[in-house]
Image (cartoon, rainbow, N blue to C red):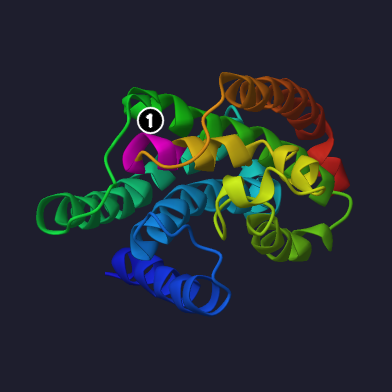
Amino acid sequence: LWFFIQPLLTTAMLVIVFGQIAKLAPADTPQILFYLSGVTAWNYFSECLTKTSTTFKDNAYIFGKVYFPRLILPLSVILSSLLKFAIQFGLFLAVLGYYLIFENTEVHPGWQIVLAPFLILLMAGISLGSGMIITSMTTKYRDLAFLIQFGVQLLMYATPVIQPLSNIIHSKYKYLILLNPVTPVIETFRVAFLGKGIFEWSYLGYSFTVMIILLVAGMYIFNRTEQTFPHTV
C-alpha cells in the first residue's frame, strides 16, 4: 500500500508547491501527470542508488562468514527495486489512461515509448555504477553513508522532476542540469508517455556514455575494495 501512497503524496506536494504556487509546471500538461511521471522514474533511480551505495556497510556480517560473488548484492538491489517500480509505473499508467479516455487533453504517448526499456536500463546502470563507487568509499569513510540520502534528495532538484527542461534550456544554468546524466532519462520518459518535452539523441548518448564509464569504474573499484574489505572493517 505504501508503494501507492508514497508517489501520490509526493506528487500532491509537488503539484501544490511547484505547480500551483511557484507556477513551474508546463501549462499544456496536466500537473498530476507531469509530476507523477517524474516521481515514478526518479523513485526507481534514487532507490537503486541509495541501497547500492551502502552494500558493504549493510552486509558486512555476511561478507565475513561465507564467500560468494559480492557483485550479486548490488545487482539484487537493482532487480528487486524493479518490483516497486512496476507497481508505481502501473499507477502512473492508470492515471494516464484516465486522462486519455475521460479528459480532453493534448497528452498522448510518443514513438519514444519503445525506448522505455532502454531508459530503465540507463537508470539502473547509472545508479549501479555510482552506488558501487560510493559503497567502496564508505568502507574507509563511514560518515559518507549519512550523506547519501540527503545528497540524493538534493540531486532531484538538478533534474527535470520539478520543472520541464524547456524552462531551463535557455537559462545560463542549463549546463549544470544537462551535466546530470539522469536529466535526459527523465525528460525522455515524459516525451515517451506524455508526448511533451525535449528529446535529443545526443542527450541520451551522453547518459549512455556516463553509464558505461560509471559501470567500468564502479566494478573496478568495487572488486579492489572487496579484496581488502575484511581488513578495512
Q: Residue at x 57, y 57 (%)?
A: 163
- Classify residue 104 as left or right of residue 73: left
Pointer 1 residue: 116
Q: Nearer the viewer, residue 63 or 215?
A: 215
Q: Position of residue 47 (x, y in %)?
A: 53, 53
Q: Position of residue 39 (x, y in %)?
A: 46, 57
Q: Would you say residue 222 is visible in this rendering?
A: yes
Q: Quadrant of residue 152?
A: bottom right
User: Can you name the residue that lies furthest to the left here?
Assistant: 102
Position of the N terminus, as image quadrant, is: bottom left
- Residue 9 versus residue 187 in the image, above or below: below
Q: Is residue 227 magenta?
A: no
Bounds of the magenta span? 189-194
- Residue 101 versus residue 121 in the image, above or below: below
Q: Nearer the viewer, residue 132 or 71?
A: 132
Disc 1 secondary structure class: helix
Q: Nearer the viewer, residue 101 or 113?
A: 101
Q: Quadrant of residue 231?
A: top right
